[in-house]
């Protein structure tokens, strides 16, 4: 395979950081800490780590491998898989589903990261902490209530991608992801000294072994792990297409899984002890990040400083994820329509903003994200798993997975991929419909 026209990652470390940047997002911050405590504390980590390891090793590896094998992103990879069965037309059609999932998430995500930027600026000026955070959040999330900050988020993402593809993505993540980990580590250390923080650690880590007998514990652990790894049948494929043949894909996948888990644990350590220290009821979702946490900072010494640190680190996590969502779409449009890169970047940014403007209200973007994350994205992930491991076939993808490795794949890889991972991806999709979201 010749070098991709968009360049390639220059190092394994840079590639892993880019993938971690895509994987680490709002789910790690506003969902994982609550689920960890609510579904068994340390006991929750048993199914969670099992699923993270499984989905990372055989799921994430598959997306990286098909991208590198074909040398292009979503649309080209699906055509390649289905052409192997002389059904190229089906591949051309099906590839659009996960790609639309990436674009759909980008549209909603940019609105939400716009809220984060607004809270960051409000923390710098102390506006957030001077008034009721619920009221402030209501003003930010009203109809057309945050347009300038929404535009800023898309403009930053577009600017990064206009400056270059693979190498620029790598450079951005080499700066932003270490800063994210550093800032959250600072927060975690600070809240450890709050009176009453020990109750938060008990909530997070005292094992409730009886929770393992609860089906919901396993369902939520599986959903959290699946979506946390950014297995969408799209986004990670494009990063794989920028990867050198010298790199060990399964190893890079597991490194991504490890760093993603560390990010989730750091989020838990930074948030839940503070929640309990101030006697606030633990929650999940937007209310945790935009209402509960500002109320905590309001009561902390130097709360303004820590509010800035928190929302700045969330911005880093959000922008790096958004870069991946954009890149999946941009590369496929370059490949499919022979667009110049700059034109594809600007078109993607323009569509994201145009549609997103109509979703500025919290209820609207919530409905949009539910549809995308409960139906489109998990269905796209199912298509990816089936296309790679069954349509293309394990033997062909195995060749790519073993390229760059010193040792052959473990014998358990094939049954884990074909008979555990693929059925579980279907189960994740079905359970998401039943539970109205598990990611």
Image (tube, helix red, strand yellow):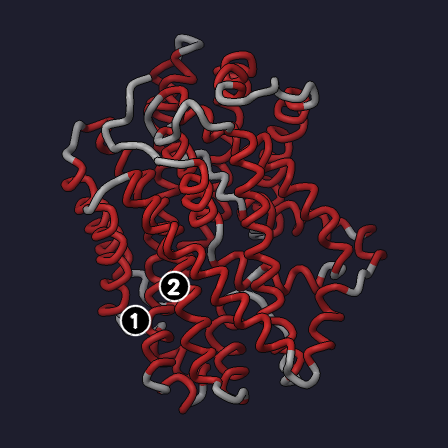
- Residue visible at 72% across and 59% down in the picture: 39
Task: Please tell me the numbered disc located at residue 143.
Answer: 1
Q: Secondary structure at mark 1?
A: loop
Local packing at callout 2 (Cα closer than 10 Å; few below 14, some 14-19, many 20+) is many
Is 101 located above or below residue 418 in the figure?
Answer: below
Q: Quadrant of residue 357?
A: bottom left
Tell me what residue is drawn at x 71 percent, y 65 percent.
204
Q: Is residue 142 left or right of residue 255?
A: left
SS label for mark 2:
helix
Residue ranking furthest to the bottom: 130
* Location of residue 87 in the rendering, given as x and y in whole percent from the top left corner: 39, 12
Is residue 98 at all visible to an observer of this figure?
Answer: no
Disc 2 to disc 1, C-alpha distance: 22 Å
The label shown at residue 388 is none
Relative height, residue 188 to residue 129 (above, below):
above
In which quadrant is the N terminus drawn? top left
Name the residue that disc number 2 marks.
Answer: 315
Quarter of the image holding residue 77? top left
Q: Is 7 left or right of 377, judged from the image as shown?
A: left
Is 408 situated left or right of 320 in this image?
right
- In the foreground, 75 or 20: 20
Query: Residue 266 placed where, x, y %?
Result: 58, 62
Looking at the rendered image, the disc whose residue lies closer to the viewer, 2 or 1, is 2
Q: Residue furthest top?
A: 86
């Amino acid at each position: 395979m010749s070098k991709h026209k968009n360049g390639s990652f220059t190092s394994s470390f840079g590639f892993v950081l880019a993938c971690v940047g895509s994987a680490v997002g709002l789910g790690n911050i506003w969902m994982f800490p609550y689920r960890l405590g609510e579904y068994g504390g340390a006991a929750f980590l048993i199914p969670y780590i099992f699923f993270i390891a499984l989905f990372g090793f055989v799921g994430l590896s598959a997306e990286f491998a098909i991208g590198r094998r074909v040398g292009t992103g979503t649309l080209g990879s699906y055509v390649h898989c289905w052409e192997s069965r002389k059904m190229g037309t089906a591949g051309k059609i099906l590839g659009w589903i996960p790609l639309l999932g990436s674009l759909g998430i980008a549209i909603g995500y940019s609105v939400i990261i716009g809220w984060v930027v607004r809270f960051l600026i409000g923390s710098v000026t102390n506006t957030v902490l001077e008034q009721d955070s619920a009221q402030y959040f209501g003003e930010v999330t009203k109809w057309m209530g945050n347009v300038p900050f929404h535009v800023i988020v898309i403009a930053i993402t577009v600017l990064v991608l206009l400056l270059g593809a693979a190498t620029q993505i790598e450079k951005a993540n080499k700066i932003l992801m270490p800063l994210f980990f550093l800032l959250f580590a600072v927060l975690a250390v600070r809240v450890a000294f709050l009176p009453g923080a020990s109750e938060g650690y008990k909530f997070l880590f005292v094992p409730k072994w009886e929770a393992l007998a609860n089906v919901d514990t396993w369902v939520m652990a599986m959903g959290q792990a699946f979506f946390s790894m950014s297995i969408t049948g799209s986004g990670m494929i494009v990063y794989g297409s920028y990867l050198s043949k010298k790199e060990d894909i399964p190893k890079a996948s597991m490194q991504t899984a490890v760093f993603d888990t560390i990010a989730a644990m750091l989020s838990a350590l930074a948030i839940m002890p503070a929640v309990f220290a101030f006697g606030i009821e633990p929650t999940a979702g937007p209310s945790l990040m935009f209402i509960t946490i500002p109320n905590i900072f309001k009561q902390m010494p130097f709360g303004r400083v820590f509010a800035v640190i928190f929302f700045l680190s969330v911005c880093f996590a959000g922008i790096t994820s958004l870069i991946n969502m954009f890149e999946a779409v941009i590369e496929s449009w370059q490949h499919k329509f022979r667009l110049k890169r700059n034109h594809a970047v600007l078109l993607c940014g323009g569509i994201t903003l145009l549609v997103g403007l109509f979703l500025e209200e919290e209820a609207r973007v919530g409905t949009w994200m539910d549809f995308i994350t409960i139906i489109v994205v998990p269905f796209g992930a199912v298509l990816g798993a089936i296309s790679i491991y069954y349509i293309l076939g394990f033997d062909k993808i195995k060749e790519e997975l073993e390229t760059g490795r010193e040792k052959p794949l473990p014998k358990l890889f094939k049954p884990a991929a074909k008979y555990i991972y693929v059925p579980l991806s279907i189960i994740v999709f079905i359970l998401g419909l039943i539970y109205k979201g598990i990611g």
